[in-house]
Image (tube, rainbow, N blue to C red):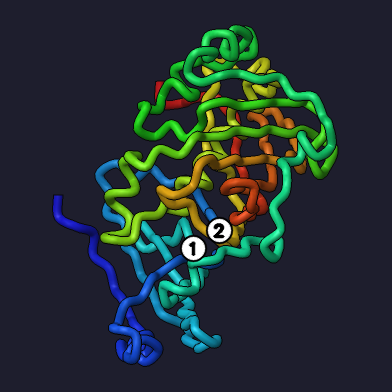
Amino acid sequence: AAPPPSSLTLAPPQAPLTMSKDHGFNLLFRNLDATAKLYAHVDLRGKTIVNTSKCTGYAMLGQMGVQKFNTVLEVDGKPFYEVDSSFGWFLPAVFEKQVGLDNGVKRECWHVANKHPVTRFALPADEGKLFAGAVAAGLAPAHLLSRRSDQVRFLDEIGLSATGGEHGKGYGHGFKTVDPRDWFFSCHFWCDPVMPGSLGIEAMHQTLELFCVHTGLGAGIANATFTHDLGKTTWKYRGQMTPKAERGDVEVHIKSVEKTAGGVTVVADGYLYVDKLRVYHATGLRIRIETNMSQ
């Protein structure tokens, strides 16, 4: 299929190069922050998505150059998704010592630090046990974790609790042992292997979905499935997962559970740790459980 049409406005191309002309023009490129808004659910089958991206600013901050972008996705002339983001250009030396979100301080995950009990499941070995109550709750396993192949499974084990967390409304924890042979390291980036930030956010969503299964939030919803809820999500990246890391942990802290006649909306905040250093923070992770109308 032909690629979708797009328009792209760039900052002056020499901007990042000015910071590395004395360092062999060797630069690393990372997403730093973003605010994303999902305006509408759109049936994209047979449609063309128009992606309009504009560079809205550029600034030098010491040994880092920051570019800001606005991106809008639309179908049939109507926008359905928009994101404002910032990206950094770094000299490699900047990444030799990561400081993360907490100024370099390493910390235990919330349930360990607070001695809060969680129910643990190994994946995929304990999927059957985890999904044992899913049918009674109206959640068909075919629409849950089993819909993912092993290639996009970013959790080795999870721990779930209907209580606790930063907001006292529920908590989920998952971890993955880092394998230097993981497929994404050879794809992203060339000669600069790092786990894409979006996969860290996806691991949070997987944990959040499994929290919903474990706590039976889909009870009474026939042929239930998960979808993204309309609204705003933000994320902040202040570190990275590379093949040198040993372990990645994710947390989700439930903020609200809203049940309506048409389904259930769950909103949470999330973190990603790399070897006990918090490096990602996401707010407003939003999923919805509703009847799958496509079947």
As rendered, which of 201 and 26 lies closer to the eye?
26
Q: What percent of the width, then of the height, locates residue 267?
A: 69, 42
Question: Of label 1 and label 2, which has the lower sequence position?
Answer: 2
Q: Which residue is mark 1?
A: 82
Of the 4 image quadrants, the one containing the C terminus is top left
- State the count of labels: 2
Q: What percent of the width, then of the height, locates residue 152?
A: 39, 34
37 vs 32: above or below: above
Crowd rating for badge 1 (residues with CA inside 10 Å; few <14, some 14–19, many 20+): many
12 vs 146: above or below: below
Instruction: Give the residue at x 69% y 47%.
Output: 269
* Type of amino acid under label 1: Glu
Instruction: Give the residue at x 63% y 9%.
Output: 133
As rendered, which of 26 and 160 lies closer to the eye?
26
| The image quarter in which residue 266 lies | top right
Q: Circles 1 and 2: CB distance less than 8 Å?
A: yes
Q: Which residue is mark 2?
A: 37
In the image, taking residue 254 as reference, residue 75 lies left or right, namely left
Q: What percent of the width, then of the height, locates residue 250?
A: 61, 41
| The image quarter in which residue 27 lies | bottom left
* Type of amino acid under label 2: Lys
- Mark 1 to mark 2 CA distance (whole Å): 5 Å
In the image, taking residue 55 as reference, residue 248 lies left or right, namely right
| The image quarter in which residue 171 lies | top right
> Circle 1 sits in a helix, a strand or a loop, which is it?
strand
* Label number found at residue 263: none
Q: What percent of the width, then of the height, locates residue 164?
A: 82, 34
Crowd rating for badge 2 (residues with CA inside 10 Å; few <14, some 14–19, many 20+): some
